[in-house]
Image (cartoon, grey):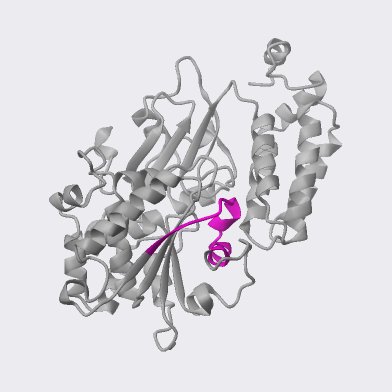
Amino acid sequence: MTDMLTPVLTANWGTDRSWTLEAYEAQGGYAALAKALKMKQDDVITAVKDSGLRGRGGAGFPTGLKWSFIPQDNPKPKYLVVNADESEPGTCKDIPLMMASPHTLVEGVIISSYAIRANHAFIYVRGEVLHVVRRLQAAVREAYAAGHLGKNIHGSGYDLDLVIHAGAGAYICGEETALLDSLEGRRGQPRLRPPFPAVAGLYASPTVINNVESIASVPSIIDKGADWFASMGTEKSKGYVIYSLSGHVKKPGQYEAPLGITLRELISLGGGMRQGHELKFWTPGGSSTPLLTAEHLDMPLDYEAVGAAGSMLGTRALQIFDETTCVVRAVLRWTEFYKHESCGKCTPCREGTWWLAQVLTRLEKGQGTEEDLDVLLDQCENILGRAFCALGDGATSPISSSIQHFRDEYLAHLTHGGCPFDPMTSTVFAQEGALA
């Protein structure tokens, strides 16, 4: 099974003091930068386009195409912003990457900024992860001292300044336009689009916003070639990614593998389910993606297959839950999170998430009625596609999908006057076959 792993981004994580410039350069670090600086900027963009790299932050939009949207005839400065505000429940790939190998990201930032002709770049990091902020700041200082950043980088005539910015700690700032507002010193709230960031982003100037993993993948593409990258993955989902495997598996952690690997294979790499238990449900891309069940174990984990199954690959945050987990309680916990993190800008999300939590709380306590399930679905329908940003849509995903797959479990809460997974009632619940 181990031949399914493709250590590229994670290849140096086990190296002694892997986060230092010395250790990074000893393994070929910054060779891609030297190569890129000898290329035409448009050729760098073309290489990323040809590689098939798609955004690793959730949406899966082609990265090179996104770069090409920057209007080069615009006299305003161009900016690159890295979205390192990792906060999707279950996602844990960017923070380990930045801790273990910050120079991989820094090198990717320099090459990407060079390609889009930006002279200023920002890495927006979640404010709570102070250890990551310090690790990145140390890497940036080393890069400046080595001449990888600053004026006339390695005699190329190209200048770049890189700023590490600590965010204020809000889930909404993972939305790219809310991130820009926060970066400018305002309250993080989504912007109305158009104009899109490529035309009027940071400081109303052309801006590219990419996820950490997207930018960190660029050096390997330039170093080894677009064809090498495109040889991995599936027809439409190219390359390698980091999967965050958590929950009821023996060895949770980060697993780097080509797109298209199945959950069954990933769970096997993770040592299997915990002893004596079976998979009940899981999320393919964090809690804001519709949950799936054991019937999807052999589905390829790529953008197309997961989408065809009615969910989203998202951030590849694979949260694994066995039969001991109450799906209603899990969904309620997620809904409480979205209610708390709603920025309040739009009515569907601000009011809708509050009401979703109220109805779910009543159901989880066994105090509701069967009609409440229809009320929940109606509320989800009124939020989906009507909120100002994707937070509202994400809040509805676990609810509607859990009712689709586990309606009987919701009804069992009403039958038993509370959670059937409570030790006092779980035996009765199992005898009635509701877990079958």
Residue at 82 percent of width and 21 percent of height: 417
From this view, report whether residue 51 is shown above or below residue 318: below
Residue at 59 percent of width and 47 percent of height: 288
Residue at 73 percent of width and 22 percent of height: 419
Across the whole image, how many numbered discs are drawn on residues? 0
In depth, the one of 119 and 400 nearer the eye is: 119
177 falls in the magenta region: yes
Tell me if I can see residue 278 in this picture.
yes
297 horizontally vs 393: left or right: left
Residue stretch in magenta: 163-182
Q: Quadrant of residue 89?
A: top right
Tell me if I can see residue 232 in this picture.
no
Of the 4 image quadrants, the one containing the C terminus is top right
In depth, the one of 139 and 232 nearer the eye is: 139
Task: Give the percent coordinates (x, y) of residue 223.
Answer: 19, 61
In depth, the one of 378 and 241 nearer the eye is: 241
From this view, report whether residue 278 is shown above or below residue 48: above
57 horizontally vs 417: left or right: left
Task: Give the percent coordinates (x, y) of residue 6.
Answer: 26, 44
